[in-house]
Amino acid sequence: MGWAIALHGGAGDIPKDLPPELREPREACLRSCLQMGVDALRAHKSPLDVVELVVRELENNPYFNAGKGSVLTSNGTVEMEACIMDGNTKNCGAVSGLTTVVNAISLARLVMEKTPHIYVAFEGAEAFAREQGVETMDPSHFITPRNIERLKQAKEANRVQVDYNTRPIPKDEKTPGPNGDSQLGTVGCVAVDSYGHLAAATSTGGLVNKMVGRIGDTPIIGAGTYANKICAVSATGQGDAIIRATVARDVAALMEYKGLSLKEAAGYVVEESAPKGTTGLIAVSATGEVTMPFNTTGMFRACATEDGHTELAIW
């Protein structure tokens, strides 16, 4: 048994010719976030603290679709959502519809620790953020030129853009993003310490040109985020497909009820349960296993284990 950590920056149809100026900053962020998480685990920080720390950093990077880099709704606004879960207790917190909160993941943790509820959204979540004194910014802080251009393209093509994928309207038409780049979807982190305690955290800005009020898989326990005493999972991809397949919970259920290994359980869910081209996930087990399967073209991902294994990959 030993500690392990994994993190992701979104999955989808990532073009192999993604320009270096778009690929390298994301790789650098994943590398620094991975090291941050490893250092925290080595310093005996709790897995809950570790996943919050890492996801906060990912939220602060405008190259990822969470926090500062959140994509825009059909009204040109941001609506951020996040979820965090402690595997040992199954305590969890989730938020949606945030427009001013700098780090949605930290507000989700406050919901878990400071309220009798699990999930708070929109005006109520914003009021709770003010009450708790968390850092907020004017909504314009989260609106980047890159995402204004993405929304414009999505509206012109009459589509809702998902991660690196698009859901065409009409069917099977595609329009590339700026310079072949489309905003990545969810960010997430899972971790286990040397005692086998687990935690998961996920955060996102959702879909380009999504309806105002749309909620994805990220804040839904058992869909985009889940942790118990067996494993911790954070999913990414097309949220509606992930919700239908209860992706995160199914990984844990296959381990608990069928006796599958982490790799077998996650592989089955991604290849057999979730539709092709929709889903990726990262997961760690209580015994320090790590897996990062996806059925999309690629997934920005990284992991490290106590025995010295590290990995950073896209395709």
Image: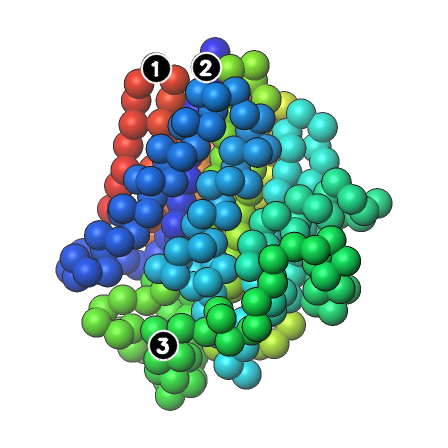
SS class of the residue under badge 1?
loop
Q: How many dots with numbers?
A: 3
SS class of the residue under badge 2?
loop
In the rendered structure, are the residues bearing label 1 and label 2 in contact, judged by CB atoms less than 8 Å apart? yes
C-alpha gap between disc 2 and disc 3:
43 Å
Is residue 307 visible in the rendered structure shown here? yes
Q: Type of residue at label 3?
A: Pro
Question: Residue 39 in the image: x percent, y percent?
Answer: 41, 27
Horizontally, is 106 left or right of 55 in the view?
right
Position above or below: 77 against 5:
below
Q: Which residue is mark 1?
A: 307
Q: Nearer the viewer, mark 2 or mark 3?
A: 3
Q: Quadrant of residue 113?
A: top right
Given the current orientation, which residue lies at the most extreme bottom position? 156
Instruction: Give the residue at x 46% y 74%.
Output: 143
SS class of the residue under badge 3?
helix
Instruction: Give the residue at x 38% y 84%.
Output: 152
Position above or below: 51 against 217:
above
What number is the disc on residue 145? Answer: 3
Question: Residue 230 in the image: x percent, y percent?
Answer: 59, 23
Q: Quadrant of residue 175?
A: bottom left
Q: How many other residues sit within 10 Å of disc 3, few (<14), some (14-19) or many (≥20)?
A: few
Relative depth, front residue between 197 and 105? 105
Q: Nearer the viewer, mark 1 or mark 3?
A: 3
In the rendered structure, are the residues bearing label 1 and label 3 in contact, judged by CB atoms less than 8 Å apart? no
Q: How many other residues sit within 10 Å of disc 1, few (<14), some (14-19) or many (≥20)?
A: few
Q: Which residue is mark 2?
A: 2
